[in-house]
Amino acid sequence: MPRITRRTYVKAPLAALALGAAEAAPAGRTTGQGGIQFSEILNPGEASRMRLAKQIGINHAIVNVNSTLAKVPRTEYVQALTKIREEFTAAGLKIAGVESHPVPAEKIKLGLPGRDEEIENYQAAIAALAQVGVPMICYNFMAGLGWYRTRVDLKERGGALTSEFNNADAKKLGLTKFGEVTEALMWSNIEYFQKAVIPVAEKHNILMALHPDDPPLSPLRGLARIVISAKNYRRIMNIVPSPVNGITYCQANFVAMGEDVYSLAQEWLKEKKIFFVHFRDIEGKGERFRETFHDNGPTDMARMLKIYGEGGFNGPVRPDHAPTLEGEGNDRPGYAMGGKVFAIGYMRGILDAYKLPHS
């Protein structure tokens, strides 16, 4: 049986700009003085990873707050987030935003009883994030399964370990415990969520950056997926039209969709809809693909960074899903630090060669 990793984006939580609530930039801003913000997933308590991030020139943290806020009542959200912010400030890092949901949201995504309470928690979390100066939430709408791979030990360059998705192997495992979930239900659920949450985010000037489904195909083991194309993104952003209703531009997922990642990035940058970038690459398409080193895939990565820089993007960019290198454990596939160190150097060299600003 193929090895499975089931992981939600909770691993990548808090992401993007770090301004005080009173100093927050206008919603949807993608232009400014600072240029691309190098960032990395750094969870509370990871002092060693924080030091390493600073040593390679990273100043912005993408942080997980879900596990913290899940343990406290809404009345303590601000206190809990303030403590997290202080820890990162002491390490010389700005919290640029939260990735995944700031509070548990599985009932929201599946439309289960209790979703209204989760939405109330979500609304309170948005207000609390604004109060402590965290301006963005990178969220997903993958119900039942998060980002999903059928192998995590595939050999990349020099024997580095990377991940693969093969839908033929996934199908052999059958349905999940949630059974079959239809696309119609998922569309209904995301509309219910957005109508309750986007107006609150706009009120508090919190950018809502929707991450693609990974893999972007439907169904996955019986679970419908709807964030799987540029067309569907446009439909979702029109549920509640707002300058804060936008995109996490995870490049490799748009490659897996078969979209033109270059022209699509240019389109959405002009519309000021890209709030956050996941910089990674794959070989293959939705039914079967594997992760690559950042310099070892089919996408012109230098061209992509040039598009972001010349398009006026000044938000966080983080190198995503790097291979596990020699001497590292593979207990967190895609999130070991060795490959990220390589990726940041690669990205910095490209931006410096093009004389594009970064911080």
Image (cartoon, rainbow, N blue to C red):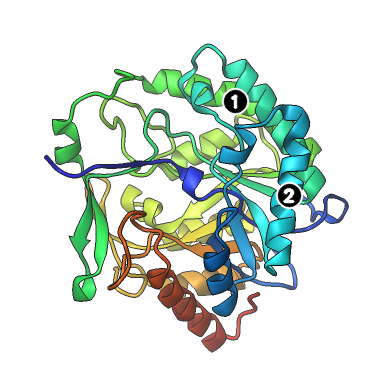
Tell me how far mark 2 sits from mark 1, CA to CA: 28 Å
According to the picture, the residue beneath numbered tag 1 turns out to be: 193
Horizontal and vertical percent for residue 180?
30, 18
Percent x, y of residue 319? 46, 65
Closer to the camera, 76 or 225?
Answer: 76
* Amino acid under disc 2: Lys
- Compare marks 2 and 1 and give the one earlier in the sequence: 2
- Residue 21 visible? The answer is yes
Image height of 353 relative to 96, above or below: below
Q: Residues within 10 Å of mark 1 (few under 14, many from 20)?
A: many
Q: Tag 2's secondary structure?
A: helix
Residue drawn 72% across the image and 42% down it: 80
Which residue is at the far right? 22
As drawn, 219 above or below 338: above
Q: How far from the left and from the top, in percent, is residue 337?
A: 43, 67
Label 2: which residue? 83
Mark in front: 2 vs 1: 2
- For the point 20% across and 76% down, which residue is it? 158
